[in-house]
């Protein structure tokens, strides 16, 4: 009788431990470099890596400054990740970087440090201050309903690459 109770106790312990681990795993998926902006996009890990890849591949670098707790960033992230056109451009035509901290390159904050802020850097490593959003007080910010403008600006970065460089 004692061995069967011991076996039953052991089985119950293992089952409850596995159940607890399964519940823990489902609460939060592992964090990736995409941070929700697009899991199929190849993301640069650092600004320096993004610059190197832009120069090497002759593609523009798109730098997204954002914060997890920013509701405006979350809205833009959802719109961007849900857009097939934006995702396709990001996957095939651009070098992508999303960062939640400021870089040492002050050219990436030409009108201040705010989020969301999106800038483009061409393969000659020039920050394209001429590719802006629609707001005069925060030139490089976009809202979710500005996604068509952001997509146009992604295309503009590609067009300028072909006509100027």
Image (cartoon, helix red, strand yellow):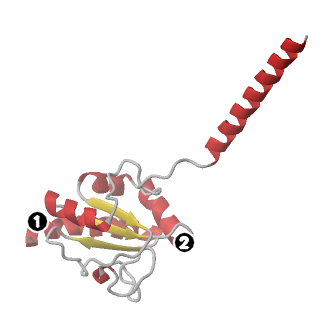
Q: Is residue 10 above or below residue 105?
A: above
Quarter of the figure that contains the N terminus: top right
Question: Looking at the image, which residue sits at the far top?
Answer: 1
Mark 2, residue position = 70
Q: Position of residue 6 (x, y in %)?
A: 83, 19
| Residue placed most toward the observer, 12 or 159 | 12
Q: In screen coordinates, is 70 left or right of 127?
A: right
Residue appearing at x 47%, y 67% in the figure: 144
Q: Position of residue 30 (x, y in %)?
A: 52, 48
SS class, disc 1? helix
Quarter of the figure that contains the C terminus: bottom left
Question: Looking at the image, which residue sits at the far right?
Answer: 1
The mark tally for this picture is 2
The quarter of the picture where residue 87 lies is bottom left
Mark 1, residue position = 162
Residue 28: assigned label: none
The quarter of the picture where residue 152 lies is bottom left
Q: Is residue 3 visible?
A: yes
Category of crowding for the residue at label 1, using alpha-carbon neighbours closer than 10 angstroms: few (below 14), some (14–19), many (at least 20): few
Q: Nearer the viewer, mark 1 or mark 2?
A: 2
| Residue placed most toward the observer, 69 or 81 | 69
| Residue placed most toward the observer, 21 or 3 | 3
Residue appearing at x 22%, y 68% in the figure: 157
The quarter of the picture where residue 104 lies is bottom left
């Amino acid at each position: 009788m004692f061995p069967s109770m011991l076996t039953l106790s052991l089985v119950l312990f293992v089952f409850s431990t596995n159940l607890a681990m399964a519940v823990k795993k489902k609460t939060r998926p592992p964090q990736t470099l995409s941070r929700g902006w697009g899991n199929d996009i190849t993301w640069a890990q650092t600004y320096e890596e993004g610059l190197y890849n832009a120069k090497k591949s002759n593609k523009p670098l798109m730098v997204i400054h954002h914060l997890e707790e920013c509701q405006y960033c979350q809205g833009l992230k959802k719109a961007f990740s849900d857009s097939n056109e934006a995702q396709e451009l990001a996957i095939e035509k651009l070098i992508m970087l999303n960062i939640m901290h400021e870089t040492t390159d002050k050219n990436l904050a030409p009108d201040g440090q705010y989020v969301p802020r999106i800038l483009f850097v061409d393969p000659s490593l020039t920050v394209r201050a001429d590719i802006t959003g629609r707001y005069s007080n925060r030139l490089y910010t976009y809202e979710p309903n500005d996604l068509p403008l952001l997509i146009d600006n992604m295309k503009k970065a590609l067009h300028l690459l072909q006509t100027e460089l």
